[in-house]
Image: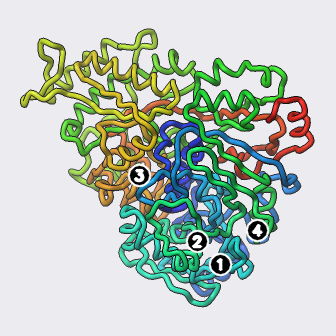
């Protein structure tokens, strides 16, 4: 379900769904496609983000008219830009990209409440603002801006009480019919009526009206008394469906199905074999192929996704040349398995591409709706049982760093004792803020011994915390409370998870056992796993949250109380008055400096809540691919882009096939 364009950090991780075990929740994960913007520039309060030629218009009549939108700061690209700076505008068209993934799918509708859809099912659809089909940042060198795609321009008042989008008259669906304002309003209402409650309830409150002005003009009005943050890009980032198809078929947004409505994007669904493959083909009649924002992009003739039962089978297919590209999330494979003939011959390239995005907040998540986990001391004790240093050295070949923050390695990461504007914000919230948050440094991960799995000092500290919380150890070594209930943790794990992830679960369970806690690792097929995560039927789960990168209304769905009971984007069910208050401060910020201070305070508060055990991250993307695949020499900082702006050297592809390297 679309949240806002500002959930980019989460989307970056979800685009790696072919290899990341935590992304098995794809039916809901793909709904995060439109994401949280990274706030980086320092500008003055309420500065309109328009190009120089539109600034005069904004100054004369109070209305901003622009080819794009950003809440703070100028757009990187002016209205007359010719291409994105990092693409190869002369990239040849043709060839096939083949990617492997694990798991199953039985639906091509990622917005349904049932069934298991795959993220590639959203590829045919476009929004008023441009977005990458791979769910990475677009443009991949501009973390702030949204640029028109179906809409050639947008206008809004300085108070952002409304937004009017002017559609491109040439935009059309793949069946040749035009994309109209009626389709835009229909889609908006469809999400409100049949979308997930966590999305529809939030948008109904903030966007009370959407209306057709004429065939190519649509207006959205925004509610009084709500944050203006992300409202323009919220409506501009919603995919647009064809009203006629839904009218003719009677299909619903919330039902599982394999049939798909025609989209307006560069890709068509060509072949779907449930649980086996999805094939996309480039639309030769794509209406937007020559737009500046599309030059050098969408270069393959086809993209084929092959589904495998487990990661071992998927990797063997890559070694055999059946698969042409792989994002490697397994540290074990990266460190030990790339010694097969295609690598030694130079036919397969291994590359570490710097990743300028903050990492998603990945780790074991506590279900705060479970009574035994509502005591913060219990969560801290369980956290102490996780040994990152040993895990990284023994299971992950030392390839990772430990994440400390929800805004890791950014200017928003809370450090030390709060001071300056951050301290003022926290003090303004009164008793909502625990005293220790004002006087003690931001919570950092504990350290553990690298030499042995069980760190005795941490286990002793954890034991004392559990005793204080009323969980005592009996003669049988098992923790029980006053009611005689044992301290057990149900942790579901999908059967197609990477072996390293399975080992992390198992060794964590060993340490929990040393504390007298029984960790029940429940292996299950991916479909059952998806159902368990949707219903929040677990005590803990290995999952991720979007990184804190800037203020957006999506913060409420991921970290806020209003949808905590049912939001698919809040696996902990976090509902904290302190977190809610800080989200509101961030959303009401009128300058970049104020927003940054509020986000830093929010990072501090999220870490204090201890609802997730912080685990590993890397500042590079590890990829392996056959050498016929090409990418720009100078890569952009915020996207790998294999599904977006890479291309194929057909001569090299023919050579590899002749040699038997590619199949």
655 vs 170, left or right, is right
The circle drawn on residue 179 is 1
Q: CA distance from mark 2 to mark 1?
A: 8 Å
Contact (Cβ within 8 Å) of mark 2 with mark 1:
yes
Q: Residue at x 38, y 71 (%)?
A: 226
Decide if residue 462 is in sight here: yes
Front: mark 3 or 4: 4
Q: Secondary structure at mark 4?
A: loop
Residue 174 position within the rendered picture, expressed as x and y whole percent measured from the top left:
70, 71
Q: In the image shown, does 197 or 639 lie closer to the viewer?
A: 197
Q: Secondary structure at mark 1?
A: loop
Which residue is labeled 4 in the image? 286
Q: In the image shown, does 501 or 434 lie closer to the viewer?
A: 501
Q: CA distance from mark 3 to mark 4?
A: 33 Å
For marks 4 and 2, the one nearer the N-term is: 2
Characterize the local packing of mark 3: few (<14), some (14-19) or many (20 or more) Cα atoms within 10 angstroms. many
Q: In the image shown, does 65 or 201 lie closer to the viewer?
A: 201
Q: Is residue 76 above or below residue 571?
A: below
Which residue is labeled 2 in the image? 240
Which residue is labeled 3 in the image? 569
For marks 1 and 4, the one nearer the N-term is: 1
Q: Is residue 472 above or below residue 159?
A: above
Residue 539 position within the rendered picture, expressed as x and y whole percent measured from the top left:
29, 37
Q: Secondary structure at mark 2?
A: loop
Contact (Cβ within 8 Å) of mark 1 with mark 3:
no
């Amino acid at each position: 379900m679309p949240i806002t364009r500002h959930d980019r950090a989460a989307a970056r991780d979800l685009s790696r769904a072919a290899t990341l075990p935590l992304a098995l929740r794809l039916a809901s994960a793909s709904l995060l496609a439109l994401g949280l913007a990274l706030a980086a520039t320092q500008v003055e309060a309420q500065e309109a983000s328009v190009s120089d030629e539109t600034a005069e218009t904004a100054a004369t009549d109070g209305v901003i008219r622009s080819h794009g939108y950003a809440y703070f700061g100028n757009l990187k690209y002016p209205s007359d830009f010719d291409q994105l700076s990092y693409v190869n505008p002369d990239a040849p068209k043709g060839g096939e990209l083949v990617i492997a993934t694990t798991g199953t799918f039985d639906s091509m509708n990622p917005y349904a409440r049932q069934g298991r859809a795959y993220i590639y099912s959203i590829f045919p659809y476009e929004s008023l603002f441009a977005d990458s089909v791979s769910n990475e940042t677009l443009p991949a060198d501009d973390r702030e801006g949204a640029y028109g795609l179906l809409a050639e321009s947008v206008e809004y008042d300085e108070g952002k009480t409304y937004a009017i989008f002017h559609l491109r008259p040439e935009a059309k669906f793949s069946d040749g019919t035009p994309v109209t304002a009626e389709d835009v309003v229909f889609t908006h209402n469809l999400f409100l009526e049949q979308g997930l409650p966590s999305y529809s309830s939030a948008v109904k409150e903030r966007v009370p009206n959407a209306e057709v002005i004429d065939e190519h003009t649509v207006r959205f009005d925004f509610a009084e008394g709500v944050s203006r943050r992300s409202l323009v890009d919220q409506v501009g980032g919603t995919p647009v469906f064809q009203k006629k198809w839904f009218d003719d078929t009677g299909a619903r947004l919330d039902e599982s199905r394999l049939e798909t409505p025609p989209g307006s994007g560069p890709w068509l669904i060509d072949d779907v074999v449930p649980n086996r493959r999805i094939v996309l083909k480039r639309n030769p009649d794509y209406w937007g192929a020559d737009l500046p924002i599309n030059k050098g992009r969408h270069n393959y003739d086809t993209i084929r996704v092959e589904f495998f039962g487990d990661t071992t089978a998927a990797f063997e297919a890559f070694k055999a040349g059946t698969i042409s590209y792989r994002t490697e999330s397994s540290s074990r494979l990266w460190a030990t398995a790339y010694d097969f003939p295609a690598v030694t011959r130079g036919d397969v390239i291994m590359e570490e591409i710097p990743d300028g995005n903050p990492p998603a907040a990945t780790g074991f998540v506590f279900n705060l709706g479970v009574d035994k986990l509502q005591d913060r001391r219990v969560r801290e004790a369980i956290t102490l049982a996780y040994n990152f240093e040993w895990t990284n050295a023994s299971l992950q070949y030392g390839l990772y760093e430990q994440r400390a923050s929800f805004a890791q390695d950014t200017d928003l990461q809370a450090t030390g004792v709060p001071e300056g504007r951050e301290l003022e914000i926290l003090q303004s919230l009164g008793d909502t803020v625990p005293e220790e948050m004002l006087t003690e440094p931001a919570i950092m991960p504990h350290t553990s011994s690298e030499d042995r799995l069980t760190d005795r000092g941490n286990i002793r500290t954890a034991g004392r915390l559990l005793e204080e919380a009323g969980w005592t150890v009996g003669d049988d070594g098992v923790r029980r409370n006053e009611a005689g209930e044992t301290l057990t943790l149900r942790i579901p794990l999908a059967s197609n998870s990477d072996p390293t992830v399975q080992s992390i679960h198992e060794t964590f369970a060993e340490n929990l056992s040393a504390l007298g806690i029984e960790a029940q690792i429940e292996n299950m097929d991916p479909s059952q796993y998806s159902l368990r995560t949707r219903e929040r039927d677990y005590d803990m789960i290995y999952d991720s949250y979007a990184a804190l990168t800037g203020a957006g209304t999506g913060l409420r769905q991921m970290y806020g109380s209003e949808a905590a009971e049912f939001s698919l984007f809040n696996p902990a069910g976090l509902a904290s008055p302190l977190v809610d208050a800080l989200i509101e401060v961030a959303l009401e910020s009128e300058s970049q400096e104020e927003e940054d201070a509020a986000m830093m305070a929010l990072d501090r508060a999220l870490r204090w809540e201890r609802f997730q055990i912080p685990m590993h991250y890397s500042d590079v993307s590890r990829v392996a691919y056959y050498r016929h695949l090409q990418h720009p020499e100078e890569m952009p900082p915020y996207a790998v882009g294999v599904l977006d702006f890479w291309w194929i050297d057909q001569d090299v592809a023919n050579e590899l096939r002749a040699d038997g390297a590619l199949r």
